[in-house]
């Protein structure tokens, strides 16, 4: 059913961009849903391109580096890079660097015991495990 969801997420994202503009928080969040759906469908390259080329540059400019939306975008990018079965060592190193930054920001913004902070620490651990075996 992820393929059906992708069609809907793409439509919602397109409508949000058309109605609100590409830099509106809701449009960016809708784009995040598209990227996450692409990840679920294992369309890793398309998800990475959407995150890197479209969503993250706009979100950084309009929302700021410590925004929860930015942190989720970076988390999604890191997981997408790390979980791609065709990822290279460089991809894993990039995923680790991204997650280190996300962990640092989550700790500062939300605190060390916040559930989202604990979750990204676990993700960073997983990325490092993959890197150790690459």
Image (cartoon, rainbow, N blue to C red):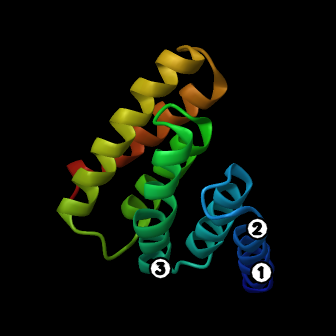
- Circle 1 residue: 11
- Circle 2 residue: 16
Q: Which is closer to the viewer, label 1 or label 2?
A: 2
Instruction: Identify the element where label 1 is drawn.
Output: helix
At a point 36% along the width and 48% down the height, the residue shown is 127
At a point 28% along the width and 43% down the height, the residue shown is 97
Tell me which corner region of the image, top left, top right, bottom left or bottom right, holds residue 4. Answer: bottom right
Q: Nearer the viewer, residue 23 or 50?
A: 23
Tell me which corner region of the image, top left, top right, bottom left or bottom right, holds residue 109. Answer: top right
| Left or right position of 7 against 118 | right
Residue 46 image label: 3
Q: Which mark is first along the chain, 3 or 1? A: 1
- The total number of labels drawn is 3
Q: Can you say which quadrant of the picture contains the N terminus?
A: bottom right
Residue 41 visible in the shown view: yes
Query: Residue 22 appears at what percent x and percent y?
Result: 62, 64
Q: Which mark is first along the chain, 2 or 1? A: 1
At a point 64% along the width and 57% down the height, the residue shown is 28
| Left or right position of 23 against 130 | right
């Amino acid at each position: 059913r992820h393929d059906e969801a992708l069609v809907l997420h793409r439509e919602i994202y397109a409508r949000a961009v058309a109605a609100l503009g590409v830099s509106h928080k809701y449009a960016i969040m809708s784009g995040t849903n598209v990227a996450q759906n692409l990840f679920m469908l294992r369309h890793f390259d398309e998800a990475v391109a959407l995150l890197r080329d479209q969503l993250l540059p706009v979100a950084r400019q309009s929302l700021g580096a410590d925004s929860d939306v930015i942190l989720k975008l970076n988390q999604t990018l890191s997981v997408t890079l790390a979980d791609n079965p065709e990822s290279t060592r460089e991809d894993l190193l990039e995923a680790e660097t991204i997650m280190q930054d996300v962990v640092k920001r989550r700790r500062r913004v939300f605190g060390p015991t916040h559930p989202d902070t604990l979750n990204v620490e676990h993700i960073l651990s997983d990325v490092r495990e993959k890197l150790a075996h690459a």
